[in-house]
Image (cartoon, rainbow, N blue to C red):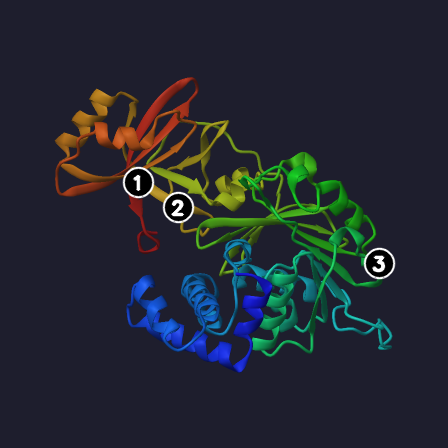
Amino acid sequence: MDLDAFRMLLTPAGRGALDEAVRILADGADPVAAASALRRGHPADLAAAALTQASLRRRAEAKFGPDAAVMYFTPHGLEQATRPEVAAHRATRIRAAGIRVDGTRAGGEPAGGPAVLDVCCGIGGDLLALARAGCAVDAVDLDPLTVEVARANAAALGLSSLAGVRTGDAALADPGGYGLLFADPARRGARGRTFDPMAYSPTWPVVLDLVARAPAACLKVAPGIPYEFIPEGAEAEWVSYRGEVKEAAIWTGMGAGGRRATLLPSGVTLTPSGAEAETGPVSRYLYEPDGAAVRAHLVAEVAALVSGRLVDPQIAYITSDRLVRTEWASCYEVTDVMPFSLKRLRAALRERRVGAVTIKKRGSAVDVERLRKDLRLSGDNSLVIVLTRIGERPFALLCQPMTSADA
Protein backbone atom coordinates (compact mmCIF):
# COMPACT_ATOMS: atom_id res chain seq x y z
CA MET A 1 0.00 0.00 0.00
CA ASP A 2 1.47 3.35 -1.05
CA LEU A 3 0.74 6.86 0.17
CA ASP A 4 -1.81 7.68 -2.53
CA ALA A 5 -3.73 4.46 -1.90
CA PHE A 6 -3.84 5.16 1.81
CA ARG A 7 -5.06 8.71 1.31
CA MET A 8 -7.94 7.32 -0.79
CA LEU A 9 -9.07 5.38 2.30
CA LEU A 10 -9.50 8.65 4.20
CA THR A 11 -12.02 10.02 1.69
CA PRO A 12 -15.75 9.35 2.11
CA ALA A 13 -15.60 6.81 -0.74
CA GLY A 14 -12.57 5.16 0.85
CA ARG A 15 -14.22 4.89 4.24
CA GLY A 16 -17.23 3.31 2.59
CA ALA A 17 -15.03 0.78 0.81
CA LEU A 18 -13.19 0.00 4.04
CA ASP A 19 -16.43 -0.51 5.97
CA GLU A 20 -17.62 -2.87 3.24
CA ALA A 21 -14.31 -4.78 3.29
CA VAL A 22 -14.59 -5.22 7.05
CA ARG A 23 -18.14 -6.61 6.70
CA ILE A 24 -17.14 -8.99 3.92
CA LEU A 25 -14.24 -10.43 5.89
CA ALA A 26 -16.39 -10.69 9.02
CA ASP A 27 -18.84 -12.83 7.02
CA GLY A 28 -16.03 -15.31 6.36
CA ALA A 29 -15.26 -14.60 2.72
CA ASP A 30 -11.87 -15.81 1.47
CA PRO A 31 -9.48 -13.18 0.03
CA VAL A 32 -10.30 -13.94 -3.61
CA ALA A 33 -14.05 -13.74 -3.08
CA ALA A 34 -13.67 -10.61 -0.97
CA ALA A 35 -11.61 -8.90 -3.65
CA SER A 36 -14.15 -9.79 -6.35
CA ALA A 37 -17.03 -8.48 -4.27
CA LEU A 38 -15.29 -5.16 -3.55
CA ARG A 39 -14.31 -4.60 -7.18
CA ARG A 40 -17.95 -4.75 -8.21
CA GLY A 41 -18.56 -1.43 -6.46
CA HIS A 42 -15.14 0.24 -6.23
CA PRO A 43 -12.06 0.87 -8.40
CA ALA A 44 -9.53 -1.95 -8.24
CA ASP A 45 -6.84 0.08 -6.45
CA LEU A 46 -9.28 1.31 -3.80
CA ALA A 47 -10.69 -2.19 -3.33
CA ALA A 48 -7.18 -3.58 -2.82
CA ALA A 49 -6.27 -0.88 -0.30
CA ALA A 50 -9.53 -1.37 1.62
CA LEU A 51 -9.11 -5.14 1.76
CA THR A 52 -5.52 -4.82 2.95
CA GLN A 53 -6.52 -2.38 5.69
CA ALA A 54 -9.48 -4.52 6.77
CA SER A 55 -7.17 -7.55 7.09
CA LEU A 56 -4.68 -5.53 9.14
CA ARG A 57 -7.45 -4.36 11.47
CA ARG A 58 -8.44 -7.96 12.13
CA ARG A 59 -4.84 -8.86 12.95
CA ALA A 60 -4.52 -5.78 15.15
CA GLU A 61 -7.41 -6.74 17.43
CA ALA A 62 -5.13 -9.01 19.49
CA LYS A 63 -2.83 -6.08 20.25
CA PHE A 64 -5.04 -2.98 20.18
CA GLY A 65 -8.41 -4.40 21.22
CA PRO A 66 -11.47 -2.28 20.36
CA ASP A 67 -9.29 0.59 19.10
CA ALA A 68 -8.25 -1.57 16.14
CA ALA A 69 -11.70 -1.12 14.60
CA VAL A 70 -11.01 2.56 13.88
CA MET A 71 -7.22 2.61 13.54
CA TYR A 72 -5.05 2.32 10.45
CA PHE A 73 -1.96 0.17 10.00
CA THR A 74 0.90 -0.89 7.79
CA PRO A 75 2.21 -4.48 8.07
CA HIS A 76 5.58 -3.46 9.55
CA GLY A 77 3.98 -0.74 11.64
CA LEU A 78 1.57 -3.19 13.26
CA GLU A 79 4.34 -5.67 14.00
CA GLN A 80 6.63 -3.07 15.57
CA ALA A 81 3.99 -1.03 17.41
CA THR A 82 4.08 -1.08 21.20
CA ARG A 83 1.25 -2.87 22.98
CA PRO A 84 -1.13 -0.23 24.44
CA GLU A 85 -0.61 -1.61 27.96
CA VAL A 86 3.17 -1.16 27.71
CA ALA A 87 2.86 2.28 26.12
CA ALA A 88 0.40 3.36 28.83
CA HIS A 89 2.80 2.18 31.52
CA ARG A 90 5.57 4.37 30.09
CA ALA A 91 3.27 7.36 29.69
CA THR A 92 2.21 6.98 33.33
CA ARG A 93 5.86 6.93 34.44
CA ILE A 94 6.52 10.11 32.50
CA ARG A 95 3.57 11.88 34.10
CA ALA A 96 4.51 10.66 37.58
CA ALA A 97 8.09 11.91 37.19
CA GLY A 98 6.87 15.51 37.02
CA ILE A 99 8.43 16.16 33.63
CA ARG A 100 6.85 19.01 31.68
CA VAL A 101 4.42 17.24 29.40
CA ASP A 102 1.46 19.58 28.96
CA GLY A 103 2.94 22.40 26.95
CA THR A 104 3.49 24.74 29.90
CA ARG A 105 6.63 25.74 31.75
CA ALA A 106 7.14 25.25 35.48
CA GLY A 107 5.69 28.71 36.31
CA GLY A 108 2.60 28.10 34.22
CA GLU A 109 3.77 30.17 31.25
CA PRO A 110 3.23 28.85 27.72
CA ALA A 111 6.05 26.60 26.64
CA GLY A 112 5.84 27.59 23.00
CA GLY A 113 5.25 24.07 21.74
CA PRO A 114 4.68 20.41 22.56
CA ALA A 115 6.54 19.02 25.54
CA VAL A 116 7.35 15.49 24.32
CA LEU A 117 9.33 14.85 21.15
CA ASP A 118 8.56 11.38 19.74
CA VAL A 119 11.09 10.46 17.06
CA CYS A 120 10.59 7.40 14.85
CA CYS A 121 6.94 7.41 15.92
CA GLY A 122 5.80 4.68 13.51
CA ILE A 123 2.04 4.26 13.30
CA GLY A 124 1.72 5.99 16.67
CA GLY A 125 1.44 3.32 19.37
CA ASP A 126 3.38 5.33 21.95
CA LEU A 127 2.21 8.65 20.56
CA LEU A 128 -1.41 7.72 21.29
CA ALA A 129 -0.63 6.57 24.84
CA LEU A 130 1.29 9.76 25.58
CA ALA A 131 -1.55 11.91 24.28
CA ARG A 132 -4.11 9.92 26.25
CA ALA A 133 -2.05 10.58 29.37
CA GLY A 134 -2.34 14.30 28.68
CA CYS A 135 1.08 14.81 27.11
CA ALA A 136 1.39 17.29 24.27
CA VAL A 137 3.46 15.46 21.65
CA ASP A 138 5.39 16.48 18.55
CA ALA A 139 5.97 13.26 16.58
CA VAL A 140 8.40 12.71 13.73
CA ASP A 141 8.99 9.86 11.31
CA LEU A 142 11.05 9.59 8.14
CA ASP A 143 8.46 7.67 6.11
CA PRO A 144 5.62 9.81 4.66
CA LEU A 145 3.16 6.88 4.61
CA THR A 146 3.83 6.06 8.25
CA VAL A 147 3.37 9.72 9.18
CA GLU A 148 0.02 9.78 7.39
CA VAL A 149 -1.08 6.62 9.21
CA ALA A 150 -0.03 7.98 12.63
CA ARG A 151 -1.83 11.25 11.93
CA ALA A 152 -4.97 9.36 10.92
CA ASN A 153 -4.83 7.27 14.09
CA ALA A 154 -4.59 10.36 16.28
CA ALA A 155 -7.63 11.80 14.50
CA ALA A 156 -9.59 8.54 14.70
CA LEU A 157 -9.12 8.42 18.48
CA GLY A 158 -9.84 12.12 19.04
CA LEU A 159 -6.27 13.02 20.02
CA SER A 160 -5.25 15.41 17.25
CA SER A 161 -5.25 18.41 19.58
CA LEU A 162 -2.40 16.87 21.60
CA ALA A 163 -0.57 14.96 18.87
CA GLY A 164 1.13 16.63 15.94
CA VAL A 165 2.84 14.35 13.39
CA ARG A 166 5.26 15.42 10.67
CA THR A 167 7.75 13.93 8.25
CA GLY A 168 11.33 14.43 9.35
CA ASP A 169 14.71 12.86 9.99
CA ALA A 170 15.15 11.92 13.66
CA ALA A 171 18.87 12.57 13.36
CA LEU A 172 18.14 16.25 12.64
CA ALA A 173 15.69 16.74 15.50
CA ASP A 174 16.46 19.15 18.33
CA PRO A 175 15.22 17.64 21.62
CA GLY A 176 16.54 20.48 23.76
CA GLY A 177 13.29 22.47 23.67
CA TYR A 178 11.14 19.61 24.96
CA GLY A 179 10.58 18.15 28.38
CA LEU A 180 11.33 14.61 27.22
CA LEU A 181 12.61 12.76 24.18
CA PHE A 182 10.93 9.48 23.30
CA ALA A 183 12.82 7.44 20.71
CA ASP A 184 11.89 4.16 19.07
CA PRO A 185 14.63 3.51 16.50
CA ALA A 186 13.70 1.06 13.77
CA ARG A 187 15.04 -2.43 14.40
CA ARG A 188 14.32 -3.91 11.00
CA GLY A 189 16.58 -3.81 7.96
CA ALA A 190 16.52 -5.30 4.47
CA ARG A 191 17.21 -8.77 5.92
CA GLY A 192 14.56 -8.58 8.62
CA ARG A 193 14.70 -7.81 12.33
CA THR A 194 18.07 -6.79 13.75
CA PHE A 195 19.28 -7.19 17.33
CA ASP A 196 22.42 -5.11 16.90
CA PRO A 197 21.91 -1.53 18.17
CA MET A 198 24.54 -0.34 15.70
CA ALA A 199 22.18 -1.48 12.94
CA TYR A 200 19.21 0.45 14.33
CA SER A 201 17.86 3.34 12.31
CA PRO A 202 18.98 5.88 13.42
CA THR A 203 22.14 4.11 14.54
CA TRP A 204 22.98 3.89 18.24
CA PRO A 205 25.53 6.76 18.21
CA VAL A 206 22.93 9.07 16.66
CA VAL A 207 20.35 8.01 19.25
CA LEU A 208 22.79 8.64 22.10
CA ASP A 209 23.57 12.08 20.69
CA LEU A 210 19.86 12.92 20.80
CA VAL A 211 19.68 11.66 24.38
CA ALA A 212 22.66 13.75 25.40
CA ARG A 213 20.85 16.89 24.20
CA ALA A 214 17.53 16.07 25.89
CA PRO A 215 16.59 17.02 29.48
CA ALA A 216 15.12 13.53 29.90
CA ALA A 217 14.62 10.60 27.57
CA CYS A 218 12.98 7.22 27.14
CA LEU A 219 14.41 4.85 24.53
CA LYS A 220 12.47 1.80 23.40
CA VAL A 221 14.93 -1.03 22.68
CA ALA A 222 14.91 -4.77 22.14
CA PRO A 223 14.86 -6.90 25.34
CA GLY A 224 18.17 -8.50 24.38
CA ILE A 225 20.12 -5.24 24.23
CA PRO A 226 23.69 -5.88 25.45
CA TYR A 227 24.42 -4.23 28.77
CA GLU A 228 27.42 -2.39 27.35
CA PHE A 229 25.07 -0.28 25.20
CA ILE A 230 23.19 1.10 28.21
CA PRO A 231 24.45 4.64 28.96
CA GLU A 232 26.12 5.20 32.30
CA GLY A 233 23.70 6.52 34.90
CA ALA A 234 20.62 5.42 32.93
CA GLU A 235 17.90 3.08 34.16
CA ALA A 236 17.17 0.00 32.05
CA GLU A 237 13.67 -1.41 32.49
CA TRP A 238 12.49 -4.73 31.11
CA VAL A 239 8.72 -5.11 30.73
CA SER A 240 6.81 -8.39 30.68
CA TYR A 241 3.16 -8.58 29.65
CA ARG A 242 1.25 -11.66 30.85
CA GLY A 243 4.46 -13.64 31.23
CA GLU A 244 6.13 -12.64 27.95
CA VAL A 245 8.97 -10.13 27.80
CA LYS A 246 7.86 -7.53 25.28
CA GLU A 247 10.62 -4.93 25.27
CA ALA A 248 13.03 -2.86 27.26
CA ALA A 249 13.23 0.88 27.85
CA ILE A 250 16.21 3.00 28.77
CA TRP A 251 15.43 6.04 30.90
CA THR A 252 17.65 9.09 31.42
CA GLY A 253 17.03 12.25 33.39
CA MET A 254 14.47 10.45 35.55
CA GLY A 255 16.43 10.10 38.79
CA ALA A 256 18.52 7.15 39.92
CA GLY A 257 19.72 4.68 37.32
CA GLY A 258 20.09 0.93 37.60
CA ARG A 259 17.95 -2.02 36.61
CA ARG A 260 14.22 -2.63 36.90
CA ALA A 261 11.78 -5.35 35.90
CA THR A 262 8.06 -4.61 35.52
CA LEU A 263 5.12 -6.98 35.16
CA LEU A 264 1.97 -5.95 33.35
CA PRO A 265 -0.94 -5.68 33.69
CA SER A 266 -0.39 -5.59 37.48
CA GLY A 267 2.39 -2.98 37.29
CA VAL A 268 4.51 -4.54 40.05
CA THR A 269 8.22 -3.80 39.79
CA LEU A 270 11.43 -5.35 41.05
CA THR A 271 14.75 -3.57 41.55
CA PRO A 272 18.13 -4.70 42.92
CA SER A 273 18.13 -5.37 46.66
CA GLY A 274 21.66 -6.66 47.06
CA ALA A 275 20.38 -10.23 47.45
CA GLU A 276 22.80 -13.05 46.69
CA ALA A 277 21.42 -16.45 45.77
CA GLU A 278 23.01 -19.61 47.12
CA THR A 279 23.25 -22.81 45.10
CA GLY A 280 21.89 -26.14 46.27
CA PRO A 281 20.23 -29.41 45.32
CA VAL A 282 16.81 -29.61 43.73
CA SER A 283 14.03 -29.53 46.33
CA ARG A 284 10.31 -30.11 46.14
CA TYR A 285 9.51 -27.00 44.10
CA LEU A 286 11.12 -25.48 41.03
CA TYR A 287 10.59 -21.81 40.15
CA GLU A 288 11.06 -20.36 36.68
CA PRO A 289 11.57 -16.58 37.03
CA ASP A 290 9.73 -14.25 34.69
CA GLY A 291 11.86 -13.26 31.71
CA ALA A 292 11.88 -9.60 32.72
CA ALA A 293 13.59 -10.50 36.00
CA VAL A 294 16.07 -12.70 34.14
CA ARG A 295 16.92 -9.97 31.63
CA ALA A 296 17.33 -7.44 34.44
CA HIS A 297 19.68 -9.78 36.34
CA LEU A 298 17.27 -9.94 39.26
CA VAL A 299 17.06 -13.72 39.67
CA ALA A 300 18.61 -13.50 43.15
CA GLU A 301 15.83 -11.12 44.18
CA VAL A 302 13.22 -13.62 42.95
CA ALA A 303 15.01 -16.39 44.86
CA ALA A 304 14.75 -14.33 48.03
CA LEU A 305 10.98 -13.95 47.51
CA VAL A 306 10.50 -17.73 47.55
CA SER A 307 13.23 -18.55 50.10
CA GLY A 308 14.99 -20.42 47.34
CA ARG A 309 18.40 -21.12 45.90
CA LEU A 310 19.75 -21.66 42.40
CA VAL A 311 19.96 -25.14 40.92
CA ASP A 312 23.15 -24.01 39.14
CA PRO A 313 24.94 -20.65 39.55
CA GLN A 314 24.72 -19.96 35.79
CA ILE A 315 21.12 -21.11 35.20
CA ALA A 316 17.97 -19.13 36.04
CA TYR A 317 16.10 -21.94 37.77
CA ILE A 318 15.30 -21.62 41.47
CA THR A 319 14.45 -24.44 43.86
CA SER A 320 12.78 -24.24 47.26
CA ASP A 321 11.11 -26.37 49.91
CA ARG A 322 8.39 -23.75 50.17
CA LEU A 323 5.39 -23.17 47.94
CA VAL A 324 5.11 -19.40 47.60
CA ARG A 325 2.62 -17.46 45.52
CA THR A 326 4.41 -14.80 43.45
CA GLU A 327 3.90 -13.10 40.11
CA TRP A 328 7.64 -13.23 39.56
CA ALA A 329 7.92 -16.93 38.81
CA SER A 330 6.03 -19.95 37.54
CA CYS A 331 6.11 -22.80 40.02
CA TYR A 332 6.35 -26.56 39.45
CA GLU A 333 6.32 -29.48 41.87
CA VAL A 334 9.26 -31.75 41.11
CA THR A 335 8.44 -35.46 41.07
CA ASP A 336 11.68 -36.85 39.62
CA VAL A 337 15.24 -35.68 39.06
CA MET A 338 17.38 -37.79 36.72
CA PRO A 339 20.56 -37.42 34.68
CA PHE A 340 19.44 -36.87 31.13
CA SER A 341 19.15 -40.04 29.07
CA LEU A 342 16.66 -40.54 26.26
CA LYS A 343 16.23 -44.20 27.12
CA ARG A 344 15.68 -43.51 30.81
CA LEU A 345 13.36 -40.57 30.18
CA ARG A 346 11.27 -42.54 27.70
CA ALA A 347 10.91 -45.40 30.17
CA ALA A 348 9.87 -43.04 32.97
CA LEU A 349 7.17 -41.45 30.80
CA ARG A 350 5.91 -44.81 29.62
CA GLU A 351 5.65 -46.01 33.22
CA ARG A 352 3.60 -42.94 34.11
CA ARG A 353 1.42 -43.26 30.97
CA VAL A 354 2.30 -39.75 29.83
CA GLY A 355 0.92 -38.78 26.44
CA ALA A 356 1.45 -35.01 26.50
CA VAL A 357 4.44 -33.03 27.71
CA THR A 358 5.51 -29.41 27.93
CA ILE A 359 9.27 -29.22 27.48
CA LYS A 360 11.25 -26.33 28.96
CA LYS A 361 14.98 -25.88 28.86
CA ARG A 362 17.76 -23.62 30.07
CA GLY A 363 21.41 -24.50 29.70
CA SER A 364 20.55 -27.55 27.59
CA ALA A 365 21.65 -28.29 24.02
CA VAL A 366 18.84 -30.80 23.40
CA ASP A 367 16.71 -30.25 20.29
CA VAL A 368 13.24 -30.03 21.84
CA GLU A 369 11.23 -30.97 18.75
CA ARG A 370 13.42 -33.95 17.97
CA LEU A 371 13.20 -35.08 21.59
CA ARG A 372 9.43 -34.82 21.49
CA LYS A 373 9.35 -37.22 18.52
CA ASP A 374 11.90 -39.58 20.03
CA LEU A 375 9.92 -39.92 23.27
CA ARG A 376 7.09 -41.77 21.45
CA LEU A 377 4.52 -40.58 23.92
CA SER A 378 1.42 -42.63 24.66
CA GLY A 379 -1.04 -42.27 27.53
CA ASP A 380 -3.66 -40.08 29.16
CA ASN A 381 -1.44 -38.16 31.58
CA SER A 382 0.60 -34.98 31.13
CA LEU A 383 3.59 -33.37 32.80
CA VAL A 384 6.34 -30.80 32.38
CA ILE A 385 9.89 -31.82 31.49
CA VAL A 386 12.58 -29.34 32.47
CA LEU A 387 15.92 -29.85 30.75
CA THR A 388 18.83 -28.11 32.40
CA ARG A 389 22.44 -28.40 33.44
CA ILE A 390 23.61 -28.86 37.00
CA GLY A 391 27.35 -28.36 37.13
CA GLU A 392 28.69 -30.07 34.02
CA ARG A 393 25.96 -32.72 33.76
CA PRO A 394 22.66 -32.52 31.86
CA PHE A 395 19.53 -33.34 33.87
CA ALA A 396 15.84 -33.89 33.26
CA LEU A 397 13.31 -32.83 35.91
CA LEU A 398 9.79 -34.23 35.76
CA CYS A 399 7.32 -31.74 37.19
CA GLN A 400 3.68 -30.80 37.62
CA PRO A 401 2.66 -27.14 37.30
CA MET A 402 1.32 -25.45 40.40
CA THR A 403 -1.45 -22.87 40.12
CA SER A 404 -2.07 -19.81 42.28
CA ALA A 405 -4.85 -21.77 43.99
CA ASP A 406 -2.27 -24.29 45.22
CA ALA A 407 -0.26 -21.69 47.14
- Which residue is rendered at x = 34% and y = 62% of the image? 31
Residue annotated with mark 1: 333
Q: Secondary structure at mark 2?
A: strand
- Name the residue rendered at 65%, 71% in the picture: 131
Res. 101 visible in picture:
yes
| In the image, farthest residue toward the top | 392
The kind of residue tagged 1 is Glu
Q: Residues within 10 Å of mark 2 (few under 14, many from 20)?
A: some
Query: Which residue is at 81% across, 71% downward?
Result: 113
Picture disc at residue 351? none
Picture disc at residue 176? 3
Task: Report the amino acid beneath label 2.
Answer: Ser
Label 1: how many Cα within 10 Å (few below 14, some 14–19, many 20+): many
Left or right side of 96 for 27? left
* Vertical placement of residue 388 versus 209, above or below: above
Q: Horizontal and vertical percent for residue 85? A: 53, 62
Name the residue nearer the viewer: 232 or 43. Answer: 43
Between 117 and 386, the residue placed more toward the observer is 117
- Position of residue 256 measured from the top left corner of the image (x, y, whole percent): 73, 49
The x, y position of residue 128, in whole percent, is 61, 68
Disc 3 on helix, strand or loop?
helix
Measured as percent of width and height from the top left, residue 12 is found at 52, 82
- Circle nearer the N terminus (3, 1): 3
Say which amino acid is labelled 3: Gly
Report the side of 197 relative to 309 (left or right): right
Mark 3 Cα within 10 Å, few/some/many (few <14, many 20+)? some
Q: Which residue is mark 2?
A: 330
Residue at 84 percent of width and 71 percent of height: 106
User: Looking at the picture, does residue 100 appear above or below residue 202?
Assistant: below
Q: Secondary structure at mark 1?
A: strand
> How far is mark 1 from mark 2, CA to CA?
10 Å
